Amino acid sequence: MASINWFKYASPVTFFPLAGRLIPWFAWMAAILAAIGLYVGLVVAPTDFQQGDAYRIIFIHVPTAWLSMFLYVVMAIWSALALGFNTRVSAMMAQAIAPTGALMTFIALWTGAFWGRPTWGTYWAWDARMTSELILLFLYLGVIALRNAIDDPRRADRACGVLSLVGVVNVPIIYFSVKWWNTLHQGSSISMTAAPKMAAIMVSGMLIMSFAAWFYSIAVVLARVRTIMIDRERGAAWVGNLAEVKNA
Amino acid sequence: MSEFLAMGGYGFYVWSSYAAMAVVIGLEIRSVRSRRKTIVEEARLTVPEATTSLFPRGHA
């Protein structure tokens, strides 16, 4: 491990083919895990004694909610690396993560609404967990809009990097909101320090779906970053030499 | 089967959630693919000379 020079992949020339080789693996892992996860979640897992079958929304709500926060942190880390080392791939990765992060946040909010209606009697409440998650969606959309508003991509990298880093304070607020405030939203179902409050089969369905969502996100972000690389590096010799560009 | 779709009376909420996920994933994959097609086409029009005339393959 120590002998690998990670900076080698800080250049699009080396990162582009690496990403291309990784995408099918992550995409297949995502598809297989999603199939298993859906089977476990919708067929194998028993009906909840309190919530009936409405609880089955958990198998997409929790994975997308986790990812919405995690992707934001990853985007902020890539932004920090881009600001610190001025590496092109870091900035492109941050750029590629934003749309997927926004979509995961949207799904977390949407599924939360459709779960809240039958269990709490409302699609939406301005409680701390939901409001901070909505702010996360606006942060993602803000980063995307800011990039589109600046013509020079290197200036856009810096501006979006700063915005991403400032916005990262929202992530712990989302995570701890159910502890810090008295929220309609329930506390964590899974904790690192205590036994899960759910049946084991439900937990495994949720974890399998989480891994599926993770692998999907990695695959789609890598596919998007490859497009961004061709876009931003066009005119460079390595782009002209790509088989898909040359023989299109 | 219809019992499965009914989800114990919660079918509307459960399937609205799962359908949204499916639609979003489908749209995201489609948008990345179509964007890639456009970008590759643009890149092809940007750099044909630079790669063919100066440094033919095997020389550079």
Image (cartoon, grey):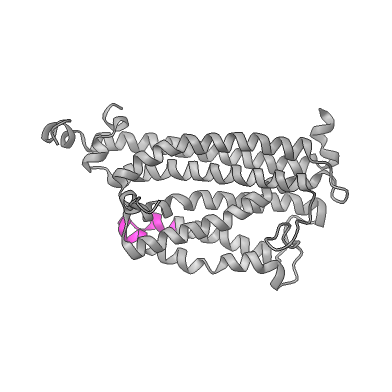
Count numbered badges in the picture: 0
State the image quarter where residue B43 is shown.
top left
The residue at the far bottom in this view is A180
Q: Left or right? Give the position of A123 relative to A17.
A: right
A14 in relation to B3, above or below: below
Q: Residue at x 66, y 47 (%)?
A: A207
Along the line of sight, which residue is nearer the eye, A243 or B38?
A243
Magenta stretch contains residue A190 = no
Q: Main secondary structure of the magenta part?
A: helix
Residue name at image x 54 percent, y 38 percent: B27
Residues drawn in magenta:
A145-157
Left/right of residue A238 with respect to residue A187 in the rendered view? left
Along the viewing direction, whichever of A20 and A196 lies nearer the viewer: A196
Q: Residue at x 16, y 34 (%)?
A: B49
Residue A103 image point, x, y percent? 56, 49
Quadrant of the rendered image containing residue A227: top left
Q: Quadrant of the C terminus of chain A?
A: top left
The correct choice, above or below, for A175 with respect to A95 in the image is below
Q: Describe residue A170's horizontal placement relative to residue B31 as left or right.
A: right
Which residue of the protein is positioned furthest toward the right in this rendering? A49
Q: Nearer the viewer, residue A172 or A139?
A: A172
The x, y position of residue A175, in whole percent, is 64, 64
